[in-house]
Image (cartoon, rainbow, N blue to C red):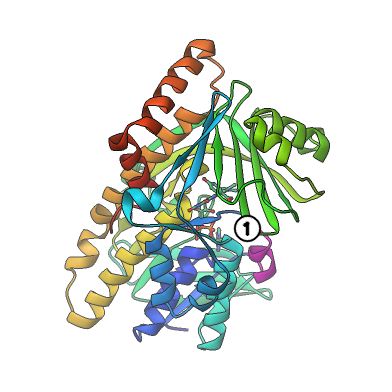
Amino acid sequence: MRTKVAIIGSGPSGLLLGQLLANAGIDNIILDRVSKDYILGRVRAGVLEEGTVGLLDQAGAGARIHREGLPHDGFSLAFDGRDHRIDLYGLTGKHVMVYGQTELTHDLMDKREATGGISIYEAANVTPHDFDGGIPYVTYEKDGTTRRIDCDFIAGCDGYHGVSRKSVPESALRIFEKVYPFGWLGILAEVQPVSPELIYANHPRGFALCSMRSHTRSRYYIQCPLDDKIEKWPDDRFYDELRRRLPTEHAEAMVTAPSFEKSIAPLRSFVAEPMRFGRLFLAGDAAHIVPPTGAKGLNLAASDVHYLFESLREYYGEKSTAGIDAYSERALKRVWKAVRFSWSMTTLLHRFPDTGDFGQKIQEAELDYLVHSTAASTALAENYVGLPY
Ligand code: RFL
Ligand code: PHB
């Protein structure tokens, strides 16, 4: 088989890139090691920047998000027993869209199917070859036989644990990493959210986040120790702990329902530089990870795809390599700003084991300054709604 761009990974970055390329007449094949249903079973991001929604529109897969997504004009920072609204729209003229990653992935998969794009699921041992100097190709195993796809370029959209970044010689990569000493325990429940907007809570017992997927589906998180086990967190204990970390008015108003999903996610910041090696490009979680506190992971994957798509379009349309030569530098400039923002939100809102009551007081002072200074609130809001591409 031959294609122009072989895309490894059928998550949001691979699917978005595949659709943008297909719409521009640049053929591509997507390979994923797991099944479609498995991918759609993963519960992840929930807050999308306007730029991400715009890319979904550009891909021709935006109809449902405009019908079912929830535009949010603000969110709350809760600390010291009180709630303070950050007026995203008033401060920036922009809002964010609350829409699950699962739904976005579904929309892109449907679009790909409707437009006849080739996706190969449950492809084992996907391996990129000869991307640094030679003519690249990808091999994989399916139904007991090894197959080969010849291509012009390989897009590594295969997430943090993928094969693409691991195929690059270690000496060619520079890794920047910070692992946080806690995780997030999250649940999904079929119940009305405690508040119409998201609440990010700083509390001496630890961080809490009240998010949602719809008017009838809540997504709640609490900070937990890294080695915690979900078996130790029956729903009653989870809700009790969540209530303790929220201002009284929300704790008292909270309606609960049995969770139908519960998981613990570790938090890390990670960047691999550069994001291009000859004819292999990395995009999304394959190149970088941010802690979820700033809601930036999926949005960064989308902005990488924007830069990569524009570069490839320029290559095929104008026969110029200027775009692909600049891809890594352009993408990394935006990546590092989101890494900084996610780190600062994480540092501001979580209880760190080694900083004690002093750390708590410093956080409360910073939060108080943040919500009462228009300059500081604007800086926060600008980053939250997404910096320009
Ligand atoms: P994905 O989604 O991990 O997809 C990668 C795909 O590659 C496949 N794959 C392989 N295929 C073939 N061969 C191999 N060897 C392969 N190895 C892997 C995988 O099966 C998979 O299908 O990466 P992508 O596309 O770059 O997308 C990134 C996003 O998924 C991620 O950044 C976000 O989910 C992060 N995130 C959030 N981002 C936001 O923008 N807003 C949020 O509110 C938000 N909340 C979150 C989050 C992530 C979370 N967790 C669990 C990590 C909340 C949580 C709890
Ligand atoms: C979510 O709804 O899953 C979510 C929302 C905001 C975040 C992280 C996760 O910052």
Verify whether residue 39 appears in magenta.
yes
Give x and y (percent) for residue 230: 76, 38
Q: Looking at the picture, how far across and down is residue 385, in whole percent?
A: 39, 52
Figure disc tally: 1
Up the image or down, 326 lies above or below 251; here it is: below
Q: Position of residue 258 (x, y in %)?
A: 82, 49
Give neighbour class at mark 1: few <14, some 14-19, many 20+ (Cα, 10 Å). many
347 left or right, relative to 373: right
Q: Quadrant of residue 23?
A: bottom left
**Image quarter hosting the C terminus:** bottom left
> What's the residue at 38%, 76% (across, down)?
58
Q: Nearer the viewer, residue 140 or 319?
A: 319
Residue that carries the numbered disc 1 in the rendered image? 213
Residue 89 or residue 40, whichever sits in front: 89
What span is in magenta?
Answer: 34-43
| Magenta highlight on residue 71 | no
Q: Amino acid at mark 1?
A: Arg
Q: Does residue 220 appear in the picture of this structure? A: yes
Q: Is residue 269 above or below residue 206?
A: below
